[in-house]
Amino acid sequence: MAKRMMTSSPHPQRGPRARGWACLAGVAYALGAGPARAEDAKEFGSKHQIIVSAERLFGVAHGSRVTKEVVPDGLSSTTLSFEDTGTTLGPLGSWGETTTIYMVPRLALDVLVVKGLSIGSGLTYFRSSVHEAVAGEIAALGPATTVDVLLLAPRIGYVLPLRRVFLWPRLGFTYVLAHSTSDTSQELGLYALTFEVPVVLQIGGHVVLTAGPTIDLGLKGASSITGPDVPPTPNRSVTETDLGVTCGLAGYF
């Protein structure tokens, strides 16, 4: 058929027929190749894709926070060390949790710069204010405690297609800044190396479920307390490490 279309004919009336066959061939090719291209564009992890995620919504997490204080003692100094541990099961992000602060839910945006390679960041900010009752009397309220928390988690990842799911390992850093005010003012800053390996399961359209292990390895941190009746705070360093298995949702386009 291709040779007939390319060979000139002494009968001019066959020209339209040849052009008709060419049009039909082009339509058939488009119909055959079009769905494949559309299918490729729908695949999670394609080039220039944008992924919007709600992460660490629920799961199980265990955290360990170590606080060290250097207390001057005459001509020398003494280092005091304290460790707090805690485990959270179920919906994550209880603002009262002090030992799994890296596990608060966050929104994330990732861009696929090439097929499979993603660059993005997670972000959380919240504020809470609580009045505590004095001596059990609801009418007698103590000073309000206001807590502000900012979390920023830049990362790089790579999408690996498996048989029916995708694996999306990611490596990055997490920074947390928490500030609490009542009759005193407390500030906490933490840094961690973050490694996540979520399994991505498509649940419909461009919506996926993510679930997998997370590790936030504490690198550095510091805390301070100030107030009118608070003595000078000794040098205080804080590190926290959180381990967990968390779940979330994501959409891509």
Image (cartoon, grey):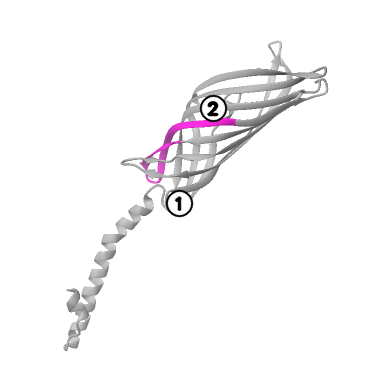
Q: Identify the residue position indicated by label 1 in the image.
A: 49
Residue sitting at 20 percent across and 78 percent down?
Answer: 5
Q: Amino acid at mark 2?
A: Asp
- Residue nearest the viewer, comparing 222 with 111: 222
Q: Residue pushed farthest front?
A: 75
Q: Is residue 97 visible?
A: no
Within 10 Å of disc 1 (Cα), the crowding (few <14, some 14-19, many 20+) is: many
- The quarter holding residue 182 reads top right
Judge whether 191 appears above or below 157 on screen: above
Residues shaded magenta:
197-218
Say what secondary structure mark 2 lies in: strand
Q: In the image, is 128 to the left or to the right of 109? A: right
Circle count? 2
Say what secondary structure mark 1 lies in: loop
Q: Amino acid at mark 1?
A: Gln
- Dominant secondary structure, magenta: strand
Q: Position of residue 184 (x, y in %)?
A: 76, 24
Upstream in the sequence, badge 2 or badge 1?
1
